[in-house]
Amino acid sequence: MSGLFIAMLVARRGLRGQTLTIAIAQWPGTLAPTISIGVLDDSPFVLGIGILCSVFDLVYIGLVAWAKRQPEVLAADATPTATPAAEIAR
């Protein structure tokens, strides 16, 4: 989920519909099954996926906090990655 939320944050170029509360509340939802199944039931697969998802959760929390402090960075126009052919022909 966090990977998708990160993609949505980048695609929307802002926090529209996303809050720091949602980002923080999502992390315990990842930790609960990771601890209960991955650690207590000794499931290395669930533990590995849970750790990976927790990393994405923390990145998402950091990105939302950063975007909240500096909203103008995401709202800036994207710079073109290539020169259009019409400009090359001039």
Image (cartoon, grey):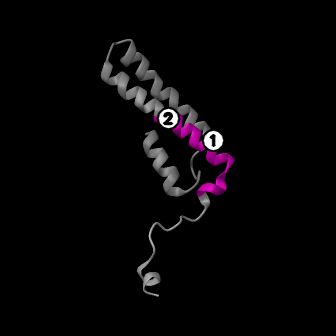
Sequence order check: which comes first, mark 2 or mark 1? 2
Q: Nearer the viewer, residue 83 or 72?
A: 83
Q: Residue 50: give x, y in percent of width and height.
A: 40, 27
Placement of 60 over or under 54, stated as above or below: below
Q: Is residue 24 left or right of residue 80?
A: right
Which residues lie in the magenta part?
56-74
Residue at the location (57% across, 37% down)? Answer: 61
Residue at the location (48% across, 28% down)? Answer: 29
Magenta highlight: main SS? helix
Q: Residue 79: give x, y in percent of width and height.
A: 53, 66
The image quadrant of residue 64 is top right
Q: Is residue 69 magenta?
A: yes
The image quadrant of residue 47 is top left
Q: Which mark is residue 65?
A: 1
Placement of 82 over or under 68, stated as above or below: below
Q: Residue 52: give x, y in percent of width and height.
A: 41, 31
Disc 2: which residue: 57
